[in-house]
Every structure is written in structure tokens, then in C-alpha cells.
């Protein structure tokens, strides 16, 4: 309980009072919130591990059942190939970054030099999509400790992806 309260306070302090108006400012604010979330996970994780380790097998089974229904559904093998692709969050996301850069290009009609910077931004966004895809679990762990570990890895990948995009976004903006 103490670790959860401490993590909540730290997370609340990291959230800005206002949302920045620029894309670069919003990316920075998002990265700061993600880092605060990682820090909160790191505060909660050791006490959760200790608590979980103190449980007997029956208590662990009941604690695991408190997890999200989604995790139990995800761990069942989907029937059709389409269901399997939908359940696999690391499946191909080709063109995802292109949607954003196409929208920017349509709305801003960049000059040739700006277009080159936009191409570099698209490349950085494709790299970020790859980082997120690689960090995406195919199966959600059934234990609370396992789910927290997966959450931490995913958050760290989001920070890495944001940092991969930041220089190109700064240059383009």
C-alpha cells in the first residue's frame, strides 16, 4: 500500500498542469509521463514481488485470478488465422507511420527542404513502430508480477520510440 501511494504521488507530480501546444512539446510531455510511469512501476515492483513470494500456492492462484479478464482471454489460442493476427500485437503494422506523414504533407504542403525533413521524420517513425512492435508481448502473463514486468518493458520501449522520433520531429518542426 505504501509503495502504491508513493508511486501515485510521484506520478501525479510528473504530470504537467497544461498540455503543450507544439508537437515537440507534446512529445516531451508524453515522454515525461511515460518515464514517471516507469518510475512508479519500479517503486511498486519490489514490494509486489515480496508480497507475491509470501503467498502459498492457493493464494497465488486466487491472486492471479484477480488479473484482467483480457489476459485470460489473450492466453487462450485464438481459433482462426485472422483471430491469431488480431491477438498478436507484434504483427506487421506497415504503413502506420505513413498515415501521420501523409496527413502532415496534405495539410502543410511542405517545401522541398521541408519534404526531406518530413521523409526523415517518417523514417524515424517507422523505426519507432519497429521498437514498439519488438517490445510487444504475444502473451500476457497470468501473474501480477509478470504483468508488471511486461508493462515496464512496454513503457521503456515507448520511451525509446519517442526518443527515436524526437530529433527528426525537432528538425522538421
Image (cartoon, rainbow, N blue to C red):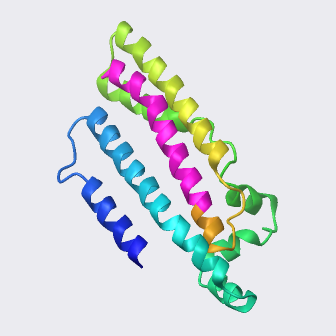
Q: Is residue 110 above or below residue 30?
A: above
Q: Quadrant of the C terminus?
A: top left
**Would residue 68 be seen by someone viewing this image from the given angle?**
no
Task: Determine which quarter of the picture holds residue 27.
Answer: top left
Task: Determine which quarter of the picture holds residue 92.
Answer: top right
> What is the x, y in percent for residue 4?
41, 72
The residue that appears at 35% across and 18% down in the rendered structure is 171
* Residue 62 left/right relative to 110: right
> What is the x, y in percent for residue 172?
35, 20
Q: How many marks?
A: 0
Residue 163 inside the magenta-drawn segment: yes
Q: Is residue 115 above or below residue 62?
A: above
Predominant secondary structure, magenta span: helix
Q: Is residue 112 above or below residue 155?
A: above
Q: Quadrant of the N terminus?
A: bottom left
* Residue 2 left/right relative to 173: right
* Residue 127 left/right relative to 3: right
The boundaries of the magenta stretch are 149-173
Q: Nearer the viewer, residue 64 or 26?
A: 64
The residue that appears at 61% across and 66% down in the rendered structure is 147
Residue 93 inside the magenta-drawn segment: no
> What is the x, y in percent for residue 45?
53, 65
**Would residue 84 be seen by someone viewing this image from the given angle?**
yes
Q: Residue furthest bottom?
A: 58
Q: Nearer the viewer, residue 94 or 160?
A: 160
The residue that appears at 82% across and 68% down in the rendered structure is 79
Amino acid at each position: 500500500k505504501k509503495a502504491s501511494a508513493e508511486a501515485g504521488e510521484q506520478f501525479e507530480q510528473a504530470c504537467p498542469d497544461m498540455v503543450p501546444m507544439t508537437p515537440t512539446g507534446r512529445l516531451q510531455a508524453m515522454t515525461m509521463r511515460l518515464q514517471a510511469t516507469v518510475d512508479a512501476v519500479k517503486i511498486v515492483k519490489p514490494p509486489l514481488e515480496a508480497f507475491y513470494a509470501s503467498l502459498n500456492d492457493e493464494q497465488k492462484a486466487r491472486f492471479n485470478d484477480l488479473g484482467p479478464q483480457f489476459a485470460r482471454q489473450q492466453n487462450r489460442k485464438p481459433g482462426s488465422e485472422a483471430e491469431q493476427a488480431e491477438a498478436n500485437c507484434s504483427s506487421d503494422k506497415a504503413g502506420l507511420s505513413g498515415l501521420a506523414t501523409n496527413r502532415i504533407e496534405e495539410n502543410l504542403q511542405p517545401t522541398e527542404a521541408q519534404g526531406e525533413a518530413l521523409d526523415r521524420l517518417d523514417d524515424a517513425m517507422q523505426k519507432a513502430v519497429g521498437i514498439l512492435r519488438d517490445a510487444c508481448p504475444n502473451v500476457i502473463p497470468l501473474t501480477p508480477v509478470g504483468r508488471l514486468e511486461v508493462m515496464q518493458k512496454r513503457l521503456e520501449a515507448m520511451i525509446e520510440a519517442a526518443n527515436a522520433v524526437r530529433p527528426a520531429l525537432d528538425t522538421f518542426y
